[in-house]
Structure formats: C-alpha cells, structure tokens
C-alpha cells in the first residue's frame, strides 16, 4: 500500500510514489481522467466573450453582444468554486482567457482568486496585450505566473491588417513592461497564415535571439464562422518544423501540465519556438486540458459539443461533490480526438466564444 500522502497537490503518480505535477507524493483524492486514460491537469477558464480587437480569424466584425448583460459572465465566487473543484481533482495550471480577459474590471481579483486556490501552481493568461503595459505589474503582484500575448506579425502594418487594430507598439511596450516587472519569460502566440506571416520566420527568429520569448506558431484552425479565410490562409507548421530541425533546433520534453506546443530550443538563442499543430495525427493523445466558458459551461474540447451547464452547481460552497460528479460523468463522453480533419469544427463559432 502507498504511504500516507505527504503534501497537498495531485494524484498524478509516476510509478509508485511521485506525482507528475508536484514531483513528490501528494494527497489529491480524485483525478479527472477520461476513458482513454488521459488525465486533466490544465483548466482553460474563459472569463468573458467580449473583445476589443477584430482578428480576421476570430472576430472579423468585432464582438457582437448577444443581448445578455456582461454581468452574466461568471462572477468571482463562481470562479473560486469551479477552480477549487478542478484543483481538488488534479488541476495544477489554470489559464484565464476569453475574449479579452483583461477587459474584465475585476481581472486582477480573478487572478488573485485563482492564485489563492490550493493546488494551483501556475496561473496563466492569454491576452491581446492591449492593457499589458499599464497593468502587468498589478497582475504579477496578484499572482499571475505566466503570460501569453498574441502578436501575429512584427510588421506593424500587417499586425493592423490581421487584428483590425493599430496597436502594435502598445502591445510590444507591454512585453517590455512584463520583463521589467520580473517575468523571466513571455510567450507570444502567432497564428500562422499563408501569404501573410508564414514566411516571416527569419524576422521572428532575429527577435528572439537575445530575448527570453517563447514564440509559438499556431496553425490556423477552422471554426464554425470561418471557411473561406481558412481555405485561403491555412498552412501546416511542418515546413517550419523541418526548417528548425535542419538549423539545429532541438525538441524539449513536455511536462504534465504543459500546453499542446512542441517546443524547440537552440544553444545560440535565448528564445524558444513552439509549434501548435492541431491537424497533426496524434495531437489529441496528449490532451490534458478542459475548458469552462465565460457562462459556466464545461467544454471537453475546443471543437466539441454545446457545453455542459455547471452554473447551477456554482452557487454555494457545499455543492462541490455534486459538481465534481457531474464533470466526471461528462468526461466519460470525451471523444478520442476532434474531427477537424473531416471539416467538422463542432459547435464553436469562433475561439473567442469559449476561450482559445
Ligand atoms: N484575446 C486573447 C488573445 O487574442 O490572446 C485571448 C483569447 S484568443 C481566442 C486565444 C488565442 O487563440 C490567441 O492567441 C488567438 O490568436 C488564437 N486564435 C483565435 N482564433 C484562432 C483560430 N481560428 N485559429 C488559431 N488560433 C486562433
Ligand atoms: Fe479578440 Fe483574441 Fe479573438 Fe483577436 S483572437 S479577436 S484579440 S479574442
């Protein structure tokens, strides 16, 4: 029999004793796991659908209010309860996303709430960087451990063309500020688009040569509201991967709560390159994440079903057992893979709707 667990954390044991996220023995009573033996260490929590950018691949016409009030997004108490339930079942990393999460007036308190949850070791956000220069110091103080910023081109005009906003310099200033306030690394997301940015690898590499930036190329994903743009601009990340390998870049080993990127390092570069290639075979095998929408629905996959209502079980602190049971039951229906290859992107109209 296993010894009495020695610390709080997660039951992701390797061999007999060691928990993968904690790297020591731990006492999490339960572990979210699906029928394909995938364990879930990573929660992507959307806190708003609202966004102030108009990225061509996401919200080309800008955010369209659905008629409901913004105040109907999960409140701080609901966020605290859902994150606690996930942490009690093995989640060690939470990414706060959206829409644009930093547009929430209580964004700093959201970070504090997530960071205060026992068992959560990494608190990350994905942001368009619009408010970063101004606010990143307070985010850090609140407990934000990791930042991803989206920058689709290093050419300000192309940045404007893709995002609909002439804010390149403001976003770059946000990255500088993040380093200034003490982040050792910033991750930058680049959605790879044929005939736009896909031939800008040399510029991106020059940028990260002496900067601790992990630059992640994300293959353009097809969503419900996008078809023509996908056909025109989708390009695989394979050519970039081949180029990196030919130039001496080496693939890093993944940790249990890492995201889906294949990360490459090179001795001559301070920065790293990540590739997120959801169309590649076996992409879903390493899936370790679940999603909660800003309205409190559980999504098992970015490209899945309508989402399962959890909100009624987020109203009181004593509902956790029932909440966990509902999530576990739904987890048993998680499919082995998405169906993007069949042109089926599920019910997701765009990634701003459940948090990319
Ligand atoms: N507004 C924030 C931002 O843009 O960083 C957070 C939400 S956004 C939906 C999260 C990430 O998804 C961004 O890096 C964005 O570039 C990416 N994304 C959005 N739509 C996408 C698509 N169709 N294909 C690939 N990546 C997409
Ligand atoms: Fe907004 Fe992010 Fe979507 Fe761009 S990708 S429109 S910044 S939610």
Image (tube, grey):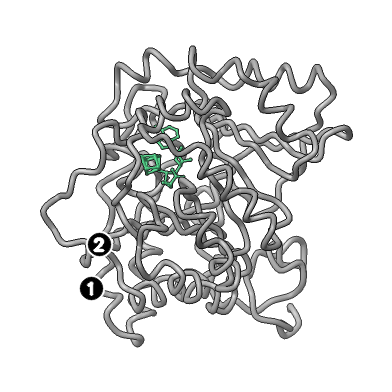
Pick whichever, 321 or 313, lies toward us: 313
Q: From what the image shows, is residue 128 above or below residue 199?
A: below
Residue 245: image quadrant is: top right
CA neighbours of label 2 inside 10 A, class few (<14), some (14 to 19), many (20+) = some
Report the residue at 85% width, 24% height from top: 248
Ligand 1 visible in quadrant = top left
- Mark number for residue 37? none
Question: Under tag 2, what secondary structure?
Answer: strand
State yes or no: Cβ of the residue under disc 1 lies below 8 Å from any atom of ligand 1.
Answer: no
Pick whichever, 60 or 88, lies toward us: 60
Tell me if 119 is positioned left or right of 191 in this view.
Answer: right
Pick whichever, 203 or 121, lies toward us: 203
> From this viewpoint, is residue 17 visible?
no
Report the residue at 58% width, 54% height from top: 147
Residue 208: image quadrant is: top right
Looking at the rendered image, the quarter that the N terminus falls into is bottom right
Report the residue at 71% width, 67% height from top: 19
Residue 270 coordinates in the image, percent (x, y) = 81, 40
Q: How many marks?
A: 2
Residue bearing the label numbered 1: 312
Residue bearing the label numbered 2: 309
Residue 326 coordinates in the image, percent (x, y) = 33, 67
Tell me if 234 is positioned left or right of 226 in this view.
Answer: right
Looking at the rendered image, the quarter that the C terminus falls into is top left
Cβ–Cβ under 8 Å for marks 1 and 2: yes
Q: Disc 1 and disc 2: Cα gap in Å?
A: 7 Å
Residue 150 coordinates in the image, percent (x, y) = 51, 40
Q: From what the image shows, is residue 216 above or below residue 81?
A: above
Question: Under tag 1, what secondary structure?
Answer: helix
Pick whichever, 255 or 50, lies toward us: 50
Residue 154: image quadrant is: top right
Residue 24 coordinates in the image, percent (x, y) = 77, 72
């Amino acid at each position: 029999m296993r010894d009495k667990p020695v610390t709080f954390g997660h039951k992701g044991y390797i061999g007999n004793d060691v928990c993968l996220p904690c790297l020591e023995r731990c006492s999490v009573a339960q572990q979210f796991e699906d029928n394909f033996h995938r364990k879930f260490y990573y929660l992507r929590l959307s806190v708003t659908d609202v966004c102030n950018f108009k990225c061509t691949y996401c919200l080309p016409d800008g955010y369209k209010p659905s008629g409901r009030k913004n105040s109907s997004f999960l409140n701080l108490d609901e966020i605290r309860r859902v994150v606690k339930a996930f942490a009690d079942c093995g989640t060690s990393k939470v990414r706060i996303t959206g829409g644009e999460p930093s547009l929430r007036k209580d964004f700093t308190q959201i970070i504090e709430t997530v960071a205060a949850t026992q068992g959560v070791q990494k608190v990350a956000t994905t942001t368009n960087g619009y408010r970063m220069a101004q606010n990143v110091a307070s985010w850090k103080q609140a407990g934000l451990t990791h930042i991803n910023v989206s920058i689709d081109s290093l050419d300000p005009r192309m940045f404007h063309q893709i995002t609909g906003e002439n804010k390149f310099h403001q976003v770059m200033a946000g990255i500088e500020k993040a380093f200034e306030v003490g982040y050792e690394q910033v991750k930058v997301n680049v959605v790879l688009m044929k005939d736009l940015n896909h031939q800008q690898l040399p510029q991106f590499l020059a940028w990260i040569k002496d900067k601790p930036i992990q630059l992640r190329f994300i293959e353009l994903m097809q969503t419900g509201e996008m078809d023509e743009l996908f056909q025109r601009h989708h390009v695989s990340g394979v050519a970039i991967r081949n180029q990196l390998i030919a130039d001496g870049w080496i693939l890093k080993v993944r940790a249990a709560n890492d995201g889906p990127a294949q990360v490459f390092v090179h001795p001559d570069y301070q920065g790293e390159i990540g590739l997120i290639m959801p169309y590649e075979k076996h992409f879903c095998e390493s899936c370790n994440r679940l999603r909660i929408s800003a309205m409190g629905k559980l999504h098992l996959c970015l490209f899945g079903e309508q989402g399962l209502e959890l909100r009624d079980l987020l109203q009181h602190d004593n509902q956790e057992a029932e909440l966990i049971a509902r999530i576990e039951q739904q987890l048993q229906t998680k499919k082995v893979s998405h169906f993007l290859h069949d042109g089926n992107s599920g019910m997701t109209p765009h990634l701003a709707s459940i948090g990319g």
